[in-house]
Image: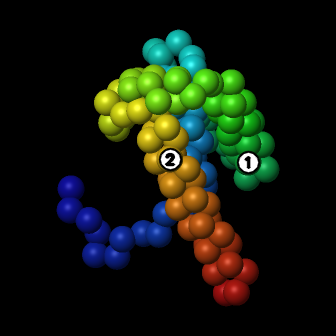
Amino acid sequence: EPEPDVVPVTTIAWRLGHLHSDFAGRWEWTFGERRQDPHLLVDFSPSAALALDRFWETLDRHRASIAALTDEQLDTVGLSQYPYGSDPDDAYIGTLANANLELIHHMAEIALLRDLWRAR
């Protein structure tokens, strides 16, 4: 389908949901059973507070699992089998660098949207 004439601005909820599913999926396909579709791991919550709580829980679990890895595991190609992207072909440390860029990128967008909303 062609893009609409005026492309809608994505919402804070969408950006947060995108990050949540990305980190939940990467955890599942690195440390979990590697079976669940990453796009189905996130229940888009009706409240921002609940969505934030669930996101931070996922990020904390991801961070704790990474902290337990050895240097050799961080250098392992294919440690993550995340099905959307190049994770299976990359050293895990590169996958982490990419995930960090994604987190910074979308959190900066969320901060900007909050600033714009406040200044309206």
**Lower sequence index among marks 2 and 1:** 1
Query: Which amino acid, by three-letter code, is at mark 2?
Result: Ala
Q: Quadrant of the C terminus?
A: bottom right
Q: Residue at x 28, y 75 (%)?
A: 5
Q: Distance between the residues labelled 2 and 1?
A: 22 Å
Question: Taking 26 as reference, is 46 above or below it?
Answer: below
Front-lying residue, 65 or 49:
65
Q: Where is residue 109 in the image (x, y as percent from the top left)?
A: 56, 67
Can you identify the residue that label 2 sits on?
A: 97
Residue 36 horizontal side relative to residue 6, left or right: right
Q: Do the residues under discs 2 and 1 have CB atoms within 8 angstroms? A: no
Most extreme residue toward the left is 2
Q: Quadrant of residue 53?
A: top right
Q: What residue type is labelled 1?
A: Leu
Image coordinates of residue 12 in percent, x first then y, are 60, 61
Which corner quadrant holds the N terminus? bottom left
Tell me, yes or no, if residue 61 can be seen here: no
Q: Would residue 49 be visible to someone looking at this image?
A: yes
Q: Nearer the viewer, mark 2 or mark 1?
A: 2
How packed is label 1: few (under 14 Cα within 10 Å), some, or many (20 or more)? Answer: some
Residue on which disc 1 sits: 52
